[in-house]
Amino acid sequence: AAAAAAAAAAACAAADVAATHVCSKALPANARKPVLRAALAAWLEQAGGVPPGNETLSVSGGETRVSSSSTRKEKRTASQALAFELASAAVTPTAVNDLCRDGFVVLDDVFPPETLLAARASAEHLLADGKMRHVGQEGRDDAVAVLDAENMPSSASRYGGLVGAAEALLAFPEALRKRSAEKVGTSSTSSERVKKTASSSARTLNRLLRVQPPSRLMLAHYPGDTTRGARYVPHLDNDPDDPLRNEGEPGLRGRDRAVTAILYLNQNWEEKDGGCLRVTLENNKGEVDIAPAWGRVVLFDCCRIVHEVRPTDAKRWALTAWIVDGPADDGEVA
């Protein structure tokens, strides 16, 4: 056993274990456990398994899970394991309750600083390299770049810094499904009753039970530093009155959008910069302005929340995933 442990230690020493050096880093409180768990998964992979005497060690959601009776690997890379841990830590029961009740929820301290810094640096590279394009849509002043979820930039490229943030947003659907299933399972409301309930809260919960990751993400830049007052007028992301909502491939149509997930990449944002996400509350209850603060994630129901980007006087970055609605019981997207 001692020889095996020594061999494992030697293998780790010879490998690149930079990904496991996280204990001394300053991490947001909500990101500490996910990052450490993902680092443990990476260490176990590099070590070639669990050291003798530690067979009960388990890494939930990571690449490796070990029990006293078996050893098996999950189909997740180390970066995807971290992404799922971050999303799972952010999507708490309270977050799901708020999302269902209000139609939106604000999540802070989700991402480690290095993930945000890398994403912002790559976003700036895309802008500098002329890769951002104006949509040409009346009422919006942003330029965008589309990321293919199945063909992400190489981590070694100028744009690879966006991968960590993108993978985390893509992990939110699974986290939302699991937490919503727990909500149904621990309440007196059955899954069938949720489907038949007409309330907006129940409809949101019904969508959350079947959401799926999108095949595309969008990076948006508002040039408030050069075009004062850059904005996006009020709109619904899944608008039943939009004549174009049924156009496009399944999964990319406006009608397929269930939940919008936005990550803001605006360091040192100040109130004077403007650019808040303005959310219109249902039933004429007023409006809420949400600052696009560094690392903040906003989730909202695409069918319920009218929103806009208020005029901004500073450079404003947002990475968006339109989480899609999965098939309903009849096989159609609801």
Image (cartoon, helix red, strand yellow):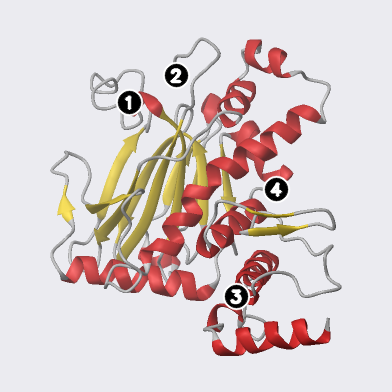
Q: Circle 4: is it few (<14), some (14-19), or many (20+) Cα within 10 Å?
A: some
Instruction: Measure the C-alpha gap from mark 2 to mark 3.
Output: 42 Å
| Among numbered discs 2 and 1, the one appearing first in the sequence | 1
Q: Quadrant of residue 292?
A: bottom left
Q: Quadrant of residue 237?
A: top left
The kind of secondary structure element at disc 1 is loop
Residue 99, horizontal then vertical, whole percent: 61, 38
Q: Amino acid at mark 1?
A: Pro
The residue pinned by badge 1 equals: 250
Please name which of the two marks, 3 or 1, marks the residue nearer to the observer. 3
Please name which of the two marks, 4 or 3, marks the residue nearer to the observer. 3
Instruction: Measure the C-alpha gap from mark 4 to mark 2.
Output: 26 Å
The residue pinned by badge 3 equals: 46
The kind of secondary structure element at disc 4 is loop
Q: Circle 3: is it few (<14), some (14-19), or many (20+) Cα within 10 Å?
A: some
Quick one: quadrant of the N terminus?
bottom right
In the image, is 323 to the left or to the right of 136?
A: right
Residue 166, horizontal then vertical, whole percent: 42, 56
Image: 192 above or below 168 = above
In the image, is 38 to the left or to the right of 158?
A: right
Picture disc at residue 260? none
| Among numbered discs 4 and 1, the one appearing first in the sequence | 4
The residue pinned by badge 2 equals: 333
Image: 248 above or below 322 = above
Instruction: Measure the C-alpha gap from mark 4 to mark 1.
Output: 30 Å
Q: Circle 1: is it few (<14), some (14-19), or many (20+) Cα within 10 Å?
A: few
Instruction: Measure the C-alpha gap from mark 4 to mark 3.
Output: 31 Å
Q: Of residues 14 and 258, which is closer to you in this image?
A: 14
Q: Residue at x 74, y 88 (%)?
A: 6
